[in-house]
Image (spheres, helix red, strand yellow):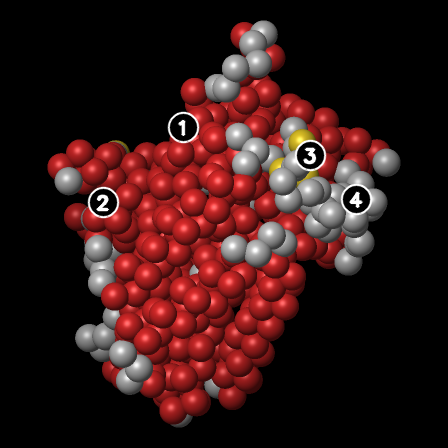
Protein backbone atom coordinates (compact mmCIF):
# COMPACT_ATOMS: atom_id res chain seq x y z
CA UNK A 1 0.00 0.00 0.00
CA UNK A 2 2.85 2.38 0.83
CA UNK A 3 4.49 1.72 -2.55
CA UNK A 4 1.18 2.30 -4.37
CA UNK A 5 0.62 5.52 -2.44
CA UNK A 6 4.17 6.71 -3.18
CA UNK A 7 3.83 6.06 -6.93
CA UNK A 8 0.38 7.67 -6.98
CA UNK A 9 1.65 10.83 -5.27
CA UNK A 10 4.68 10.92 -7.57
CA UNK A 11 2.45 10.86 -10.65
CA UNK A 12 -0.55 12.90 -9.51
CA UNK A 13 0.70 14.82 -6.46
CA UNK A 14 2.28 18.28 -6.47
CA UNK A 15 5.84 17.68 -7.66
CA UNK A 16 6.62 21.40 -8.00
CA UNK A 17 4.97 24.20 -5.99
CA UNK A 18 5.09 27.80 -7.24
CA UNK A 19 4.16 30.52 -4.70
CA UNK A 20 1.56 33.07 -5.87
CA UNK A 21 0.42 36.47 -4.55
CA UNK A 22 -2.04 36.43 -1.68
CA UNK A 23 -0.54 33.36 -0.02
CA UNK A 24 -1.71 30.97 -2.72
CA UNK A 25 0.45 28.44 -4.51
CA UNK A 26 0.36 26.61 -7.83
CA UNK A 27 1.03 22.89 -7.44
CA UNK A 28 2.20 21.10 -10.59
CA UNK A 29 2.06 17.30 -10.83
CA UNK A 30 4.44 15.30 -13.01
CA UNK A 31 1.68 14.56 -15.53
CA UNK A 32 0.71 18.24 -15.79
CA UNK A 33 4.40 19.11 -16.29
CA UNK A 34 4.55 16.56 -19.13
CA UNK A 35 1.19 17.09 -20.87
CA UNK A 36 0.68 20.86 -20.81
CA UNK A 37 4.10 21.81 -22.29
CA UNK A 38 3.76 18.94 -24.79
CA UNK A 39 0.33 20.22 -25.83
CA UNK A 40 1.73 23.72 -26.33
CA UNK A 41 4.66 22.35 -28.34
CA UNK A 42 2.50 20.19 -30.63
CA UNK A 43 -0.06 22.99 -31.06
CA UNK A 44 2.65 25.35 -32.27
CA UNK A 45 4.34 22.68 -34.38
CA UNK A 46 1.08 21.77 -36.14
CA UNK A 47 0.42 25.50 -36.68
CA UNK A 48 -2.58 25.59 -34.35
CA UNK A 49 -4.22 22.55 -35.91
CA UNK A 50 -7.37 22.50 -33.67
CA UNK A 51 -8.41 25.93 -35.01
CA UNK A 52 -6.96 25.81 -38.51
CA UNK A 53 -8.32 22.41 -39.55
CA UNK A 54 -11.56 22.25 -37.57
CA UNK A 55 -13.70 22.34 -40.78
CA UNK A 56 -11.68 19.36 -42.07
CA UNK A 57 -12.48 17.41 -38.89
CA UNK A 58 -16.21 17.84 -39.53
CA UNK A 59 -15.84 16.83 -43.18
CA UNK A 60 -13.77 13.72 -42.41
CA UNK A 61 -16.31 12.58 -39.79
CA UNK A 62 -18.81 11.99 -42.61
CA UNK A 63 -16.47 9.83 -44.73
CA UNK A 64 -17.00 6.09 -45.15
CA UNK A 65 -14.26 3.46 -44.71
CA UNK A 66 -12.17 2.63 -47.74
CA UNK A 67 -12.04 -1.09 -48.41
CA UNK A 68 -11.47 -3.81 -45.79
CA UNK A 69 -14.90 -5.27 -45.01
CA UNK A 70 -13.87 -6.52 -41.54
CA UNK A 71 -12.26 -3.25 -40.49
CA UNK A 72 -13.97 -0.24 -38.95
CA UNK A 73 -14.38 3.25 -40.34
CA UNK A 74 -12.71 6.38 -38.99
CA UNK A 75 -16.06 7.47 -37.58
CA UNK A 76 -16.49 4.13 -35.79
CA UNK A 77 -13.03 4.51 -34.26
CA UNK A 78 -14.12 7.96 -33.11
CA UNK A 79 -17.24 6.43 -31.51
CA UNK A 80 -15.08 3.94 -29.58
CA UNK A 81 -12.65 6.58 -28.31
CA UNK A 82 -15.54 8.94 -27.49
CA UNK A 83 -17.22 6.13 -25.52
CA UNK A 84 -14.19 5.89 -23.22
CA UNK A 85 -13.47 9.62 -23.04
CA UNK A 86 -17.09 10.46 -22.27
CA UNK A 87 -17.59 8.75 -18.92
CA UNK A 88 -18.06 9.39 -15.25
CA UNK A 89 -15.42 12.13 -15.33
CA UNK A 90 -17.67 14.23 -17.57
CA UNK A 91 -20.35 14.19 -14.89
CA UNK A 92 -18.89 13.81 -11.40
CA UNK A 93 -15.38 14.95 -12.35
CA UNK A 94 -16.52 18.28 -13.75
CA UNK A 95 -18.65 18.91 -10.67
CA UNK A 96 -15.65 18.12 -8.44
CA UNK A 97 -13.38 20.46 -10.41
CA UNK A 98 -15.81 23.39 -10.21
CA UNK A 99 -16.62 22.68 -6.55
CA UNK A 100 -12.92 22.82 -5.66
CA UNK A 101 -11.72 25.46 -8.12
CA UNK A 102 -14.78 27.57 -8.87
CA UNK A 103 -16.42 28.40 -12.20
CA UNK A 104 -13.05 29.51 -13.61
CA UNK A 105 -11.89 25.88 -13.62
CA UNK A 106 -14.12 25.33 -16.68
CA UNK A 107 -12.11 27.88 -18.69
CA UNK A 108 -8.87 26.02 -17.96
CA UNK A 109 -10.54 22.75 -18.95
CA UNK A 110 -11.29 24.35 -22.33
CA UNK A 111 -7.68 25.50 -22.74
CA UNK A 112 -6.38 22.06 -21.79
CA UNK A 113 -8.67 20.44 -24.37
CA UNK A 114 -7.53 22.75 -27.16
CA UNK A 115 -3.90 21.99 -26.36
CA UNK A 116 -4.64 18.28 -25.96
CA UNK A 117 -6.21 18.13 -29.42
CA UNK A 118 -2.79 18.53 -31.05
CA UNK A 119 -1.30 15.77 -28.86
CA UNK A 120 -4.26 13.52 -29.75
CA UNK A 121 -3.58 14.19 -33.44
CA UNK A 122 0.07 13.11 -33.15
CA UNK A 123 -0.59 9.86 -31.27
CA UNK A 124 -3.57 8.82 -33.42
CA UNK A 125 -1.68 9.49 -36.66
CA UNK A 126 1.24 7.38 -35.42
CA UNK A 127 -1.19 4.58 -34.53
CA UNK A 128 -2.38 4.61 -38.15
CA UNK A 129 1.15 4.70 -39.55
CA UNK A 130 2.26 1.66 -37.54
CA UNK A 131 -0.95 -0.40 -37.55
CA UNK A 132 -0.93 -4.04 -38.63
CA UNK A 133 -3.52 -6.63 -39.66
CA UNK A 134 -5.43 -8.34 -36.86
CA UNK A 135 -5.54 -12.13 -37.44
CA UNK A 136 -8.07 -12.72 -34.63
CA UNK A 137 -10.73 -10.05 -35.03
CA UNK A 138 -10.07 -9.08 -38.63
CA UNK A 139 -9.31 -5.56 -39.81
CA UNK A 140 -6.40 -3.72 -38.18
CA UNK A 141 -4.88 -3.20 -34.75
CA UNK A 142 -2.16 -1.10 -33.15
CA UNK A 143 -1.53 1.64 -30.63
CA UNK A 144 1.41 2.86 -28.54
CA UNK A 145 2.73 -0.65 -27.81
CA UNK A 146 3.09 -1.15 -31.57
CA UNK A 147 4.64 2.16 -32.56
CA UNK A 148 6.98 1.98 -29.55
CA UNK A 149 7.96 -1.54 -30.68
CA UNK A 150 8.69 -0.41 -34.25
CA UNK A 151 10.71 2.59 -33.06
CA UNK A 152 12.87 0.47 -30.71
CA UNK A 153 13.20 -2.28 -33.35
CA UNK A 154 14.55 0.23 -35.87
CA UNK A 155 16.97 1.68 -33.32
CA UNK A 156 18.50 -1.62 -32.18
CA UNK A 157 17.89 -3.69 -35.32
CA UNK A 158 16.14 -6.46 -33.41
CA UNK A 159 12.59 -7.80 -33.70
CA UNK A 160 12.27 -8.80 -30.03
CA UNK A 161 9.54 -7.24 -27.95
CA UNK A 162 10.44 -3.87 -26.50
CA UNK A 163 10.48 -3.49 -22.70
CA UNK A 164 8.93 -0.01 -23.01
CA UNK A 165 6.12 -1.39 -25.20
CA UNK A 166 5.52 -4.25 -22.73
CA UNK A 167 5.36 -1.77 -19.84
CA UNK A 168 2.84 0.37 -21.72
CA UNK A 169 0.62 -2.64 -22.47
CA UNK A 170 0.77 -3.85 -18.85
CA UNK A 171 -0.02 -0.34 -17.55
CA UNK A 172 -3.01 -0.16 -19.88
CA UNK A 173 -4.43 -3.51 -18.76
CA UNK A 174 -3.92 -2.49 -15.13
CA UNK A 175 -5.61 0.87 -15.69
CA UNK A 176 -8.64 -0.59 -17.49
CA UNK A 177 -9.26 -3.16 -14.74
CA UNK A 178 -9.23 -0.34 -12.17
CA UNK A 179 -11.64 1.71 -14.28
CA UNK A 180 -14.01 -1.29 -14.41
CA UNK A 181 -14.49 -1.05 -10.65
CA UNK A 182 -15.04 2.72 -10.71
CA UNK A 183 -17.67 2.30 -13.44
CA UNK A 184 -19.85 -0.25 -11.65
CA UNK A 185 -19.56 1.51 -8.28
CA UNK A 186 -20.75 4.81 -9.77
CA UNK A 187 -23.66 3.18 -11.60
CA UNK A 188 -24.88 1.14 -8.60
CA UNK A 189 -24.69 4.23 -6.36
CA UNK A 190 -26.61 6.43 -8.83
CA UNK A 191 -29.35 3.81 -9.29
CA UNK A 192 -29.66 3.36 -5.54
CA UNK A 193 -30.15 7.14 -5.16
CA UNK A 194 -32.60 7.47 -8.06
CA UNK A 195 -34.63 4.24 -7.86
CA UNK A 196 -33.74 2.72 -4.45
CA UNK A 197 -32.48 -0.39 -6.27
CA UNK A 198 -30.00 -2.41 -4.15
CA UNK A 199 -26.45 -2.31 -5.62
CA UNK A 200 -26.36 -6.12 -5.98
CA UNK A 201 -29.25 -6.17 -8.49
CA UNK A 202 -27.85 -3.27 -10.53
CA UNK A 203 -24.41 -4.89 -10.61
CA UNK A 204 -25.69 -8.31 -11.72
CA UNK A 205 -27.66 -6.78 -14.61
CA UNK A 206 -24.67 -4.61 -15.60
CA UNK A 207 -22.25 -7.57 -15.62
CA UNK A 208 -24.60 -9.87 -17.57
CA UNK A 209 -25.35 -7.19 -20.18
CA UNK A 210 -21.65 -6.34 -20.57
CA UNK A 211 -20.69 -10.02 -20.74
CA UNK A 212 -23.15 -10.75 -23.55
CA UNK A 213 -21.55 -7.97 -25.61
CA UNK A 214 -17.82 -8.24 -24.87
CA UNK A 215 -17.64 -12.04 -25.06
CA UNK A 216 -18.97 -11.96 -28.62
CA UNK A 217 -16.37 -11.48 -31.33
CA UNK A 218 -17.40 -8.21 -32.97
CA UNK A 219 -20.43 -6.89 -31.08
CA UNK A 220 -18.48 -4.02 -29.47
CA UNK A 221 -18.39 -1.62 -32.41
CA UNK A 222 -22.05 -2.21 -33.37
CA UNK A 223 -23.23 -1.48 -29.83
CA UNK A 224 -21.14 1.69 -29.48
CA UNK A 225 -22.34 2.91 -32.89
CA UNK A 226 -25.83 3.03 -31.35
CA UNK A 227 -25.12 4.04 -27.73
CA UNK A 228 -22.61 6.87 -28.16
CA UNK A 229 -24.61 9.16 -30.49
CA UNK A 230 -27.78 8.60 -28.42
CA UNK A 231 -26.22 9.27 -25.01
CA UNK A 232 -24.16 12.28 -26.12
CA UNK A 233 -27.06 13.69 -28.15
CA UNK A 234 -29.60 13.32 -25.32
CA UNK A 235 -27.26 14.91 -22.79
CA UNK A 236 -26.51 17.80 -25.14
CA UNK A 237 -30.20 18.39 -25.98
CA UNK A 238 -31.30 18.30 -22.33
CA UNK A 239 -28.53 20.78 -21.47
CA UNK A 240 -29.56 22.97 -24.40
CA UNK A 241 -33.12 22.99 -23.06
CA UNK A 242 -31.83 24.02 -19.61
CA UNK A 243 -29.68 26.79 -21.16
CA UNK A 244 -32.63 28.15 -23.18
CA UNK A 245 -34.86 27.97 -20.11
CA UNK A 246 -32.28 30.01 -18.14
CA UNK A 247 -31.09 32.14 -21.07
CA UNK A 248 -31.20 35.36 -19.06
CA UNK A 249 -28.58 34.00 -16.65
CA UNK A 250 -26.01 33.17 -19.36
CA UNK A 251 -24.18 36.53 -19.42
CA UNK A 252 -23.68 36.34 -15.65
CA UNK A 253 -22.50 32.71 -15.83
CA UNK A 254 -19.92 33.41 -18.56
CA UNK A 255 -18.80 36.56 -16.74
CA UNK A 256 -18.26 34.43 -13.63
CA UNK A 257 -16.28 31.82 -15.60
CA UNK A 258 -13.86 34.39 -17.07
CA UNK A 259 -13.63 36.52 -13.94
CA UNK A 260 -12.73 33.51 -11.81
CA UNK A 261 -10.33 32.16 -14.45
CA UNK A 262 -8.25 35.37 -14.46
CA UNK A 263 -9.76 37.50 -11.71
CA UNK A 264 -7.62 39.53 -9.37
CA UNK A 265 -9.96 38.57 -6.54
CA UNK A 266 -9.04 34.89 -6.89
CA UNK A 267 -5.31 35.65 -6.97
CA UNK A 268 -5.44 37.93 -3.93
CA UNK A 269 -7.70 35.55 -2.02
CA UNK A 270 -5.23 32.75 -2.64
CA UNK A 271 -7.49 30.73 -4.91
CA UNK A 272 -6.00 31.14 -8.40
CA UNK A 273 -3.82 28.03 -8.11
CA UNK A 274 -6.85 25.90 -7.25
CA UNK A 275 -8.84 27.35 -10.15
CA UNK A 276 -6.14 26.70 -12.74
CA UNK A 277 -5.00 23.28 -11.54
CA UNK A 278 -8.45 21.82 -10.91
CA UNK A 279 -9.43 22.79 -14.43
CA UNK A 280 -6.18 21.57 -16.01
CA UNK A 281 -6.04 18.26 -14.13
CA UNK A 282 -9.68 17.44 -14.80
CA UNK A 283 -9.33 18.38 -18.45
CA UNK A 284 -6.30 16.12 -18.88
CA UNK A 285 -7.96 13.22 -17.10
CA UNK A 286 -11.20 13.56 -19.04
CA UNK A 287 -10.00 13.93 -22.63
CA UNK A 288 -7.16 11.35 -22.25
CA UNK A 289 -4.98 13.11 -24.85
CA UNK A 290 -1.44 11.79 -24.45
CA UNK A 291 -2.36 8.76 -22.36
CA UNK A 292 -2.18 6.40 -25.34
CA UNK A 293 -5.70 5.00 -24.91
CA UNK A 294 -7.44 6.46 -27.96
CA UNK A 295 -4.67 5.35 -30.40
CA UNK A 296 -5.69 1.74 -29.64
CA UNK A 297 -8.99 2.53 -31.39
CA UNK A 298 -7.48 4.89 -33.98
CA UNK A 299 -5.21 2.13 -35.31
CA UNK A 300 -8.23 -0.05 -36.14
CA UNK A 301 -9.73 2.48 -38.55
CA UNK A 302 -9.72 1.81 -42.29
CA UNK A 303 -9.19 5.33 -43.60
CA UNK A 304 -7.53 6.82 -46.67
CA UNK A 305 -4.95 8.96 -44.83
CA UNK A 306 -3.30 8.52 -41.39
CA UNK A 307 -3.65 12.26 -40.79
CA UNK A 308 -7.42 12.01 -41.27
CA UNK A 309 -7.68 9.66 -38.30
CA UNK A 310 -5.46 12.02 -36.34
CA UNK A 311 -7.86 14.87 -37.08
CA UNK A 312 -10.86 12.74 -36.07
CA UNK A 313 -9.29 11.93 -32.71
CA UNK A 314 -8.45 15.61 -32.20
CA UNK A 315 -12.15 16.24 -32.82
CA UNK A 316 -12.93 13.62 -30.17
CA UNK A 317 -11.13 15.73 -27.55
CA UNK A 318 -13.31 18.68 -28.58
CA UNK A 319 -16.49 16.60 -28.17
CA UNK A 320 -15.42 15.33 -24.77
CA UNK A 321 -14.36 18.55 -23.09
CA UNK A 322 -15.73 21.53 -25.01
CA UNK A 323 -19.17 19.96 -25.48
CA UNK A 324 -19.93 17.28 -22.86
CA UNK A 325 -17.93 18.66 -19.91
CA UNK A 326 -19.38 22.11 -20.61
CA UNK A 327 -22.89 20.59 -20.46
CA UNK A 328 -22.24 19.30 -16.92
CA UNK A 329 -20.79 22.66 -15.91
CA UNK A 330 -23.81 24.58 -17.23
CA UNK A 331 -26.27 22.31 -15.40
CA UNK A 332 -24.42 23.10 -12.19
CA UNK A 333 -23.72 26.82 -12.74
CA UNK A 334 -27.29 27.64 -13.80
CA UNK A 335 -28.67 26.28 -10.51
CA UNK A 336 -28.82 28.58 -7.44
CA UNK A 337 -25.54 28.24 -5.50
CA UNK A 338 -27.33 28.01 -2.13
CA UNK A 339 -29.24 24.95 -3.36
CA UNK A 340 -26.13 22.81 -3.72
CA UNK A 341 -24.13 24.04 -0.69
CA UNK A 342 -22.61 21.15 1.22
CA UNK A 343 -23.22 18.65 -1.59
CA UNK A 344 -20.60 17.05 -3.83
CA UNK A 345 -20.22 14.58 -6.68
CA UNK A 346 -23.28 12.77 -7.97
CA UNK A 347 -25.50 14.14 -5.17
CA UNK A 348 -24.71 17.71 -6.27
CA UNK A 349 -25.36 17.04 -9.96
CA UNK A 350 -28.62 15.20 -9.25
CA UNK A 351 -29.76 18.06 -7.00
CA UNK A 352 -29.01 20.61 -9.73
CA UNK A 353 -30.94 18.51 -12.27
CA UNK A 354 -33.84 18.17 -9.85
CA UNK A 355 -33.98 21.98 -9.67
CA UNK A 356 -34.02 22.28 -13.48
CA UNK A 357 -36.30 19.35 -14.38
CA UNK A 358 -37.88 17.98 -11.22
CA UNK A 359 -37.86 14.25 -10.46
CA UNK A 360 -37.21 13.48 -14.13
CA UNK A 361 -33.81 15.19 -13.80
CA UNK A 362 -32.63 12.81 -11.06
CA UNK A 363 -33.71 9.78 -13.09
CA UNK A 364 -32.18 11.21 -16.29
CA UNK A 365 -28.76 11.68 -14.65
CA UNK A 366 -28.83 8.10 -13.28
CA UNK A 367 -29.70 6.68 -16.72
CA UNK A 368 -27.19 8.86 -18.61
CA UNK A 369 -24.46 7.88 -16.12
CA UNK A 370 -25.33 4.24 -16.79
CA UNK A 371 -24.96 4.80 -20.54
CA UNK A 372 -21.72 6.80 -20.17
CA UNK A 373 -20.20 4.22 -17.84
CA UNK A 374 -21.42 1.16 -19.75
CA UNK A 375 -20.05 2.47 -23.05
CA UNK A 376 -16.74 3.24 -21.33
CA UNK A 377 -16.46 -0.39 -20.19
CA UNK A 378 -17.21 -1.69 -23.70
CA UNK A 379 -14.66 0.75 -25.16
CA UNK A 380 -11.81 -0.09 -22.78
CA UNK A 381 -12.13 -3.78 -23.63
CA UNK A 382 -11.72 -2.82 -27.28
CA UNK A 383 -8.55 -0.95 -26.24
CA UNK A 384 -7.34 -4.04 -24.41
CA UNK A 385 -7.43 -6.27 -27.50
CA UNK A 386 -4.18 -5.17 -29.20
CA UNK A 387 -2.34 -4.91 -25.87
CA UNK A 388 -3.31 -8.42 -24.79
CA UNK A 389 -2.20 -9.66 -28.23
CA UNK A 390 1.14 -7.83 -27.93
CA UNK A 391 1.86 -9.39 -24.53
CA UNK A 392 0.48 -12.90 -24.97
CA UNK A 393 0.28 -13.49 -28.72
CA UNK A 394 -2.65 -14.10 -31.05
CA UNK A 395 -4.91 -16.52 -29.19
CA UNK A 396 -8.50 -16.47 -27.99
CA UNK A 397 -7.57 -17.87 -24.56
CA UNK A 398 -5.71 -14.74 -23.40
CA UNK A 399 -8.31 -12.44 -24.96
CA UNK A 400 -11.18 -14.22 -23.18
CA UNK A 401 -9.35 -14.46 -19.83
CA UNK A 402 -8.77 -10.70 -19.74
CA UNK A 403 -12.43 -10.03 -20.56
CA UNK A 404 -13.49 -12.37 -17.74
CA UNK A 405 -11.08 -10.61 -15.34
CA UNK A 406 -12.58 -7.23 -16.28
CA UNK A 407 -16.11 -8.59 -15.73
CA UNK A 408 -15.10 -9.89 -12.28
CA UNK A 409 -13.71 -6.43 -11.42
CA UNK A 410 -16.94 -4.90 -12.70
CA UNK A 411 -18.91 -7.12 -10.32
CA UNK A 412 -16.68 -6.43 -7.29
CA UNK A 413 -16.74 -2.67 -7.87
CA UNK A 414 -20.53 -2.57 -7.91
CA UNK A 415 -20.73 -3.97 -4.39
CA UNK A 416 -17.87 -2.15 -2.65
CA UNK A 417 -15.54 0.81 -3.25
CA UNK A 418 -11.94 -0.40 -3.00
CA UNK A 419 -9.88 2.77 -3.21
CA UNK A 420 -6.73 0.63 -3.46
CA UNK A 421 -7.85 -0.69 -6.84
CA UNK A 422 -8.97 2.78 -7.94
CA UNK A 423 -5.51 4.13 -7.12
CA UNK A 424 -4.03 1.32 -9.22
CA UNK A 425 -6.20 2.51 -12.12
CA UNK A 426 -4.91 6.07 -11.72
CA UNK A 427 -1.35 4.78 -11.54
CA UNK A 428 -1.96 2.74 -14.68
CA UNK A 429 -3.12 5.74 -16.73
CA UNK A 430 -0.24 7.83 -15.33
CA UNK A 431 2.37 5.25 -16.36
CA UNK A 432 0.72 4.85 -19.76
CA UNK A 433 1.06 8.59 -20.29
CA UNK A 434 4.76 8.64 -19.37
CA UNK A 435 5.61 5.66 -21.62
CA UNK A 436 3.54 7.03 -24.50
CA UNK A 437 4.77 10.62 -24.31
CA UNK A 438 8.41 9.48 -24.16
CA UNK A 439 8.06 8.16 -27.70
CA UNK A 440 5.79 10.83 -29.22
CA UNK A 441 8.57 13.39 -29.47
CA UNK A 442 11.09 11.25 -31.42
CA UNK A 443 8.32 9.92 -33.68
CA UNK A 444 6.36 13.17 -34.11
CA UNK A 445 8.21 13.94 -37.35
CA UNK A 446 6.42 10.98 -38.98
CA UNK A 447 3.05 12.42 -37.97
CA UNK A 448 4.03 15.86 -39.24
CA UNK A 449 5.03 14.34 -42.58
CA UNK A 450 1.61 12.64 -42.79
CA UNK A 451 -0.07 15.99 -42.01
CA UNK A 452 1.92 17.70 -44.76
CA UNK A 453 0.96 14.98 -47.28
CA UNK A 454 -2.71 15.35 -46.30
CA UNK A 455 -2.68 19.13 -46.69
CA UNK A 456 -0.82 18.97 -50.00
CA UNK A 457 -3.07 16.20 -51.33
In the rendered image, which quarter contains the N terminus? top left
Give the mark toward the camera: 1 or 4: 4
Indicate the secondary structure of the residue bearing disc 2: strand
* Side of 353 where 74 appears, left or right: right
Q: Residue 304 appears in which quarter of the rendering?
A: top right
Which residue, given by chain and number where applicable, does mark 1 sit on?
A: 167
**Residue 253 makes an appearance in the image:** no
> Which mark is drawn over residue 133?
3
How far apart are the two marked residues, 1 and 2, measured between alpha carbons? 34 Å
Earlier sequence position, callout 4 versus callout 3: 4
Q: Residues within 10 Å of mark 1 (few under 14, many from 20)?
A: some
* Side of 63 where 198 appears, left or right: left
Which residue, given by chain and number where applicable, does mark 4 sit on?
A: 68
Q: How crowded is mark 4: few (under 14 residues within 10 Å), some or many (20 or more)?
A: some
Quick check: marks 1 and 4 in contact, CB under 8 Å? no
Earlier sequence position, callout 1 versus callout 2: 2
Give the camera-side residue of 347 and 161. 161
- Relative height, residue 70 to residue 141 (above, below): below
How far apart are the two marked residues, 1 and 4, measured between alpha carbons? 31 Å
Which residue is found at the position 65% from the left and 37% from the top?
A: 134
Which residue, given by chain and number where applicable, does mark 2 sit on?
A: 25
Quick check: marks 1 and 2 in contact, CB under 8 Å? no
How far apart are the two marked residues, 4 and 3, measured between alpha carbons? 10 Å
Amino acid sequence: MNIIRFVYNFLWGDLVTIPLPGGSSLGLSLLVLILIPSGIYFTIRTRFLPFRLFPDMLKIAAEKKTGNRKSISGMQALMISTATRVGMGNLVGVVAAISAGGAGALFWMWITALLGSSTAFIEATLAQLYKEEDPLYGGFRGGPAYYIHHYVKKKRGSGRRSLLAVLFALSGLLCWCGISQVISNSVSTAFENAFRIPPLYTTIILVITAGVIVLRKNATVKVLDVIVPIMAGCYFLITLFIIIKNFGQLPAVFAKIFQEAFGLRQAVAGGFGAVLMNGAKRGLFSNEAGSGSAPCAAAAADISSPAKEGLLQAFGVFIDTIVICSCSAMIMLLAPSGLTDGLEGMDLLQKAMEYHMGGFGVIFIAVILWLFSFSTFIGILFYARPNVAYLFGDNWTSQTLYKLLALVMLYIGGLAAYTFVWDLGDIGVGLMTIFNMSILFPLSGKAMKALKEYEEG
